[in-house]
Amino acid sequence: MTTDTSLTVYIDFKSPYAYLAIEPTRQLARELGITIDWLPFVLDIPSYLGSASLGSTGEVAQQSRSENQWSKVKYAYYDCRRYANLRGITLRGTVKIWDSNLAAIAMLWAKRQGTDVLQAFIDGIYEPFWKRELDVEDYPAIERVLAAAGANTGGFREYACGTGARENERIQQDAFDRGIFGVPTYVLGGQTYFGREHLPRIRWQLQGELGPGPDIAYELMPDSRVEKTALRTLDVGIGLDDPESYPAVAGVLELAQDLDLAVNWYALPARQQHHRPDSERQDRAARHRRYRLENRHRDQRRYLQRADGDCASRIRALLTQHGIALREGEVAADWAGYASLDGYVGSPVFRLGEETFVGRQHLPLIRARLP
């Protein structure tokens, strides 16, 4: 339990996941009366996802990505647009991998001038950037956003080239050395959480950790406009050797009971076996892979209490208890592709009509879509 009511949140303006987390995080702060320390964390995307840029007509003009990396990028945009559309937010895919260091330095400049200026600056960057209306590498453009946010821009360029650049570099290095590798990342009372799906648990921690801790979830915002479906059947793909499958099964069973929903249960192919990240290599890409794996294990301990053991037996026992038999060998090829986003077959994968969801954090939206 923590008595610390200061929440640190790392964001990057070129991350759609961070963009979608801004308002839910603010809502949490308003709800609980807490202070948020917003900090920039500039993603080095090529070090773990390769690079790509588009030509003038929208074609891929340059790229250095594997098929698996492209799958991750394409699903990320598919997933983020789904939630952006619920709130009327425009997310257009970027034409290149932007260097967002200047915007990060400007964020630190705005932060010096007060909370209201900082929040206005954050909004002033995110919305036009994701509409492809703002060049975050352009000094005049960034200065205009600062001025519109109410910031004094006198001396900004000198700051950006000197003190601000050094401060930003220190923040980046300190964060990465602490194991932070992506955004949004939340730090609270010695606990680190990657992704807005952890906001329910962050709220629980801030409120004194009373009762069982909640599972991960993409909570819907009050202004979310959810389109209902007439479908009454949900397809669920489960990886028997993935520890995260177990809480997903329980969540689907509860959903089916509450809504009198028919569920088709499928067994996903076994995970691909990959070597653990090289513990000796110290380049950024290798460290990123280690941090990501460590985060996965941390989340398993946090939410599952156990990250090992015979997953398949536990899951089959739970399904048998409810009279459910998995359909094996019937999973469509695209299911396996979606489940392999991080280089291994994970789960769960949900199909509601033509809509695909990877991960149990989507259960609130699936529930909201159903009649």
Image (cartoon, rainbow, N blue to C red):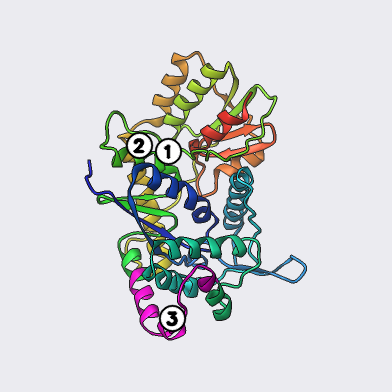
Marks 2/1 in contact by CB < 8 Å: the verdict is yes
* Residue 216: numbered disc: 1
Q: Is residue 307 visible?
A: no
Q: Quadrant of residue 263?
A: top right
Would residue 81 be counted in the magenta stretch? no
Q: Quadrant of residue 90?
A: bottom right
Nearer the observer: mark 3 or 2; the answer is: 3
Q: Is label 3 in a helix, a strand or a loop?
A: helix
Q: Is residue 311 above or below residue 282?
A: above
Q: Residues within 10 Å of mark 1 (few under 14, many from 20)?
A: many
Q: Position of residue 195 (x, y in %)?
A: 44, 49
Q: Residues within 10 Å of mark 3 (few under 14, many from 20)?
A: many
Q: Is residue 6 above or below residue 150?
A: above
Q: Which residue is mark 2?
A: 303
Would residue 168 be counted in the magenta stretch? yes
Of residues 275 and 141, the one drawn nearer to the viewer in this rendering: 141
In primary-sequence order, the first of circles 2 and 1 is 1
What residue appears at the point 34 percent right and 42 percent down from the top-left corner? 32
Residue type at mark 3? Ala
The tally of labels here is 3
User: Where's the N terminus, which quadrant?
Assistant: top left
Of residues 159 and 255, the one drawn nearer to the viewer in this rendering: 159
Marks 3/2 in contact by CB < 8 Å: the verdict is no
Q: Is label 2 in a helix, a strand or a loop?
A: helix
Residue type at mark 2? Tyr
Q: Which residues are magenta?
A: 145-171
User: Where's the C terminus, which quadrant?
Assistant: top right
The secondary structure that most of the magenta stretch takes on is helix
Q: Is label 1 in a helix, a strand or a loop?
A: loop
Nearer the observer: mark 3 or 1; the answer is: 3
Q: Which residue is mark 3?
A: 160
Q: Residues within 10 Å of mark 2 (few under 14, many from 20)?
A: some
